[in-house]
Image (spheres, rainbow, N blue to C red):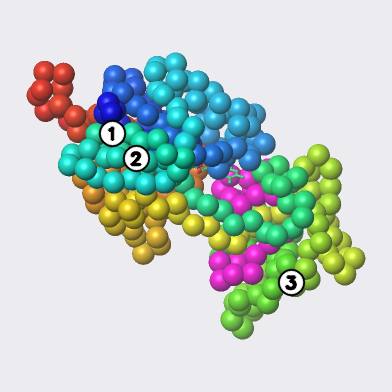
Amino acid sequence: MATTDVGIVGAGFAGLAAALTLRRHRHSVLLFNGGPCRNSWASEVHGYLGARGLSGAEMWRTACEQAQEVGAEIVQASIAEARQEGDEFLLKAAQGPEWRVRRLLLATGVRDSYPDIDNFFDFYGRSVHNCPHCDAYEVRDKPVALVSWSEAMLPFATKLTQWTRELTVVTDGRSPELSPAERAKLDELGIPVLTQTVRCFEGADGQLSGLRFVDGSLLLVQAAFFNIAHEFETTLAQQLGCALTEGECIQQDEHMRTTVEGVWAAGDVTGEEQLVAVAAAQGVKAGIDIYRSFPTPDGEPTPE
Ligand SMILES: Cc1cc2nc3c(=O)[nH]c(=O)nc-3n(C[C@H](O)[C@H](O)[C@H](O)COP(=O)(O)OP(=O)(O)OC[C@H]3O[C@@H](n4cnc5c(N)ncnc54)[C@H](O)[C@@H]3O)c2cc1C
């Protein structure tokens, strides 16, 4: 089995940026794509300098083309197992095939949990969001719901007041995990908490007009944010023995190196700000550091 210079698991913006960088440094690259990247839900990507009016899917397609144009090979496979063998890494797909690589970048992102609301995906990424940094500006000063019931609810609601004071917390039938002091804080901020179960979202063409509750009542809003849970996708990192942080993301240094030599991490899985620009920047940093980890074509150490 031939050995490829670099294997990149995860073809989101972190993985693609690294693949582009490494191919431009003339290293062989296999980029494993195990499913849609997180941003593919976004009807429009916001806050990425130089890209305006592009959907997440359009931006991803262009990024794939750019990486492929310089020779990155995108393999449609989910990697189920990663193992170190000497100074190489063996990657195995769930479906069976195996690959050998000299360096490994984990750009595996996160797994989101979604509210259990029937027509959620008709609105997700259009007027139902999970990231205020990405999407709250578009609904500034508009009526907005926050679907949340966990301990993260109060900080999330407080954060949203930067954009709108017309905010209602909806716990979707759960008892909110709030201490009396936290409840008082929400009162002080003028944020009502509705505990009814949501039956469905109302609106057309992905644009939310309200939340319909099982008791028939309607909360008129133009957007909703949700904050339930998400997990860092660290299965492979754990198989390889990479240290995780207390927050369960992959621990990495300023060069995106993990605690296992020959393995780097980039993007959402590192626990940094979850933004396309950050994922892409980390992918580039990892790519440059991986290039530096190889000797020059004449066998000399690559200069910093
Ligand atoms: C709805 C939505 C809207 C957003 N809008 C914006 C926005 O407007 N602006 C902005 O800056 N950010 C936005 N974000 C955040 C942005 O999408 C993420 O920060 C960014 O996609 C992170 O890139 P990544 O490469 O780290 O992870 P991802 O893009 O999630 O890519 C990780 C990839 O790894 C794959 N993978 C995981 N495990 C394996 C495996 N074992 N084998 C093979 N493949 C694997 C996954 O299938 C996935 O394709 C949004 C996020 C969401 C959810």
Residue 173, numbered circle: 3
Instruction: From the top left corner, tell me how far across and down residue 47 is, in percent.
Output: 55, 37
Q: Which quadrant holds residue 248?
A: bottom left
* Lower position in the chain sequence, tag 2 or tag 3: 2
Q: Amino acid at mark 3?
A: Gly
Residue 157, numbered circle: none
Q: Which residues are magenta?
A: 128-153
Helix, strand or loop at label 2? It is strand
223 on left or right of 102: right
Instruction: From the top left corner, tell me how far across and down residue 256 is, in percent.
Output: 30, 43
Compute the Cα span from label 1 to label 3: 49 Å
48 on left or right of 145: left
Q: Amino acid at mark 1?
A: Val
Q: Quadrant of the C terminus?
A: top left
Q: Nearer the viewer, mark 1 or mark 3?
A: 1
Mark 1, ligand 1, within 8 Å: the answer is: no
Helix, strand or loop at label 1? It is strand
Q: Which quadrant holds residue 107?
A: top left
Residue named by callout 1: 101
Residue drawn 54% across and 30% down?
60
The reply to whether the C-beta atoms of the residues labelled 2 and 1 are less than 8 Å apart is: yes
Helix, strand or loop at label 3? It is loop
Residue named by callout 2: 91
Mark 3, ligand 1, within 8 Å: the answer is: no
How crowded is the residue under tag 1: few (<14 C-alpha within 10 Å), some, or many (20+)? many
